[in-house]
Image (cartoon, helix red, strand yellow):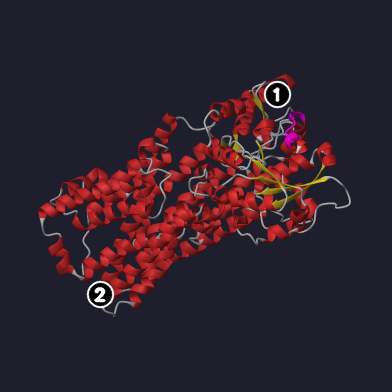
Amino acid sequence: MNLKYRPEIDGLRAIAVVSVVFFHAGFKFFSGGFIGVDVFFVISGFLITQIILSDLSNNKFSILTFYERRIRRIIPMIFLIMFISFIFSWFILMPSDMVQFTDSIFSVSFFSSNFLFYKEAGYWDISSELKPLLHTWTLAVEEQFYFIFPILLILGNHINKKLRLIFLLALIIISFFFAEWASKASENSATFAFYLLPARAWELGFGALIALCVVNFPDFYNKLNGNRVTNEFLSIIGFGLILFPVFYYDQNTPFPGVFTIAPIFGTGILLVFCMKSTISYSILSNKFIVQIGLMSYSIYLWHQPIFSFCRYISFPEPSNLLVLALTISIFPLSYFSWRFVENYFRNKDVISKKFIFTMFFSGTFIFVIIGILGRNFNGFIFRNVVDNVKILKYQPDNVILREESWEMLRTLSNDSSYQRENNEFDRKLWFDLTNDKRKLLVVGNSHSKDVFNSLIFNPKINLIFDIARFGIKISDLNEVDHLFFNTPNYVNSDIVMFASKYSREDLEILDDLIKRVLRDGKKVVLVKSIFEFSNFGNRNLADFYVKKFVNSNTDINKYSVDSLVNEINKAYYQEYNNSKSKEFQKDVIIDNIGDVFPEIIILDRMQYICNDNSKTCYAINNDLEKFFFDYGHNTKAGAIFFGNRIEEVGWLQLINDN
């Protein structure tokens, strides 16, 4: 079996990579450009399976040779990107961001970055845009697939060809239905489906299935695409199935799953029916497009770190002109890396097998060490990246502020690992049953921590209420016999206050949950989700204003700092005011619940966070202590300030009156 070069496949790669790059650049017309990754998966499965089958048919397949090819193809460029990204990160990233970056270096070294990014954040989160190595999750998925798949092909090489096809088809169907279920079941499962192999294997497997059909049933294949009119018609359909999602899908499209069928089938159709006589072939085999396809791996690897570093240092977002210039610059840069790195290391006459494996293992060792050191030295905290913003009490690293916000609960529990949910200490009695204070239990995710902190830091509030907290996702309370209902704090509480950033699953069970708590004789308080202010990874709006202020002021005095604080707080209010007139769906649902249960109390945190009279949302004080470490979670300083604001605006008055 001889494999012929097919330029139209490189043309297809060009369509895929341009879609991905333009999507990450933020060009609105390419809102579904992320499907380029799925096109890559099908092409990869098709080509790699053809190569393996060819070697097997010629009795020259070797696992060592197979992985040597993979190393030559992938490793030199990814090592280059990791090295250059590390240099830029050294001079740019905050310590906490540097820890995350070195974690990604560590995971990329073992082709497991998809697991890391799955745990850290969803693909659509703004923070993901700032991860220089986010795009390596696709390489991880591919290499995990190719760790298993060649072995399956070898084991199945001597069985009936039809049985082998049926077995592969069964795996594809199982993976597809899992992807469809997971992408819609919950936010966490959707993230799992996006990043991890079980929900992506069917895409690579579909390409492999086409290759098996082409190789094992050549007569049927030749007969299938022997009609010029059929080839023309179907290749146009295939083209359309790829281009339509590029322009009409967006981040709200459940993915992967049913909607992924279009680009997957479109790619498969082109692999089979895009013959030399078709218009599609003429387009895809154009020399310019083919050249972009040849460089597609370099283009793909360069685009994410370029965009992420640019966004990291921009205020608050890079201009359209800058993004366009960066997008254009990716292509000549990729040409040089394709020509002088990719092609150089793939040349067996220049680079020996011994050298390629030595480079792989030694390079992996170095990057693993960097990853370990980055975490052990707290993101190489001795770097001077924060020296230029050391002003008053300003803390540029929001991860540090996030950890400080848990101090009170960790002190109370005597547990340094106390976190958002599932804490053993929450199951114990916090209340002092010897006093006659009203027992208030705050329940919810990390936002319940913020409300708890604000209440507990105000001495006057503590004269009236005995306050406890139970960390849990509201949706987890859908079981009537959940252990929460037997905890001593719940049993002895007078008031149960639910405070959370409500998910769809939370809102679905609130009616039944409220009925249960009311039956138990408790007063129910629902706290609306906080407004989500602009946030850029581990930095928020206040950080950009402070950075801009420091860079443009050589003479910093009290008057200029007071003006800065006023400017920041006004900017937060403007953002909130421009959006609050819109009916937020979650708020509407909460208000509707209030109509169904008139005996419950509904509170809005924005009542004490913002001041309509002064047109201010409080985000920072005159010592430049921030009140938020992200889009809406309170810092310790914020909790203390808002604790006083709660008393000032009478936020708890409805509870006091009932």
Which three-letter amino acid code belongs to the residue tagged 2? Lys
**Depth order, front residue of 227/170:** 170
Could you tell whether 655 is left or right of 570 in the image? right
- Residue 641, percent from left and from top: 75, 34
**Depth order, front residue of 96/420:** 420
- Locate residue 160: give its quadrant: bottom left
Residue under label 2: 162
Highlighted range, magenta: 648-654
The answer to whether marks 1 and 2 mark residues whose Cβ atoms lie closer than 8 Å is no
- Residue 525, percent from left and from top: 68, 43
Picture quarter with the N terminus: bottom left
For the residue labelled by badge 1, is the local secondary structure a helix, a strand or a loop?
helix
Tell me the crowding category of disc 1: few under 14, some 14 to 19, or many 20 or more residues within 10 angstroms, Cα based: some
Q: Indicate whether 511 appears above or below 552.
A: below
Could you tell whether 231 is left or right of 289 in the image? left
Gap in angstroms between the C-alphas marked 1 and 2? 75 Å
User: Does any portion of residue 316 appear in the rendered image?
Assistant: yes
- Locate residue 327: give its quadrant: top left
For the residue labelled by badge 2, is the local secondary structure a helix, a strand or a loop?
helix
Farthest-out residue, bottom: 158
- Locate residue 172: give its quadrant: bottom left
Q: Indicate whether 617 appears above or below 266.
A: above
Q: Is residue 253 magenta?
A: no
Q: Residue at x 39, y 63 (%)?
A: 175
Residue 561, numbered label? 1
Residue 249, numbered label? none
